[in-house]
Image: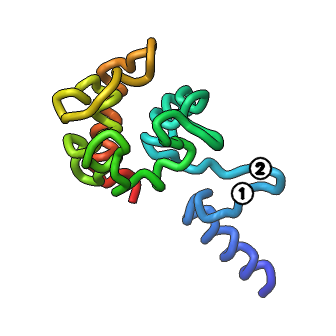
Amino acid sequence: MMRVLTLALLGSVLLSGCDSLPPAPGSTPEVAQTPFERDLAPKIADCFGCHTGENPEAGLNLLDMQALIGVESSQLKMALIEPGNHLQSYLWHKVAGTQSIAGGLGRQMPVNHEWPKEDIDLLARWIDLGAGI
């Protein structure tokens, strides 16, 4: 009887596939990253030299992107990140170099290191898809 039960349990494990088994001790299961985490976060991290700490440039601390959602820019009456609308997101305009068209000030960001169009488009898509909220 015990042998039949053991074989039945083994058969159900094999039929259900390895996905149902817990990870091996000491192993770390892979966690799927969002496009923001995988592709944008490292680009944003390149800006930490100026936009983190006690007195970040333009008062913009990029360490917590979620904290920028719905927060008005210090340069004009536009949200830094407006979920669902990159054209109403001043952070996107600064990175895209269209800040003056939006009514803002200053130079394209990051200074002396323009993002490739693909990265600017990825930022736009992240914002348009709700900015991770």
> Do the residues under discs 1 and 2 have CB atoms within 8 angstroms?
yes
Residue depicted at x 47% and y 55%:
67
Q: Position of residue 16 (x, y in %)?
A: 55, 65
From the viewer's side, name the closer residue of 96 and 120: 96
Asked where in the image residue 109 lies, by quadrant, the reply is: top left
Q: Position of residue 25 (x, y in %)?
A: 82, 56
From the viewer's side, name the closer residue of 62 and 122: 62
Image quadrant occupied by the C terminus: bottom left
- For label 1, the residue is 23
From the viewer's side, name the closer residue of 25 and 118: 118
Report the side of 72 relative to 63 (left or right). Answer: left
Residue depicted at x 83% and y 52%:
26
Q: Position of residue 28 (x, y in %)?
A: 72, 50
Asked where in the image residue 119 lies, by quadrant, the reply is: top left
What residue type is disc 2 on? Ser
- Using the image, tell me which numbered label, if any, was put on residue 35: none
Image quadrant occupied by the N terminus: bottom right
- The image shows a total of numbered marks equal to 2
Q: Residue furthest left?
A: 101
- For label 2, the residue is 27
Question: Dot 2 lies on which element?
Answer: loop
Disc 1 crowd, CA 10 A, few/some/many (<14, 14-19, 20+):
few
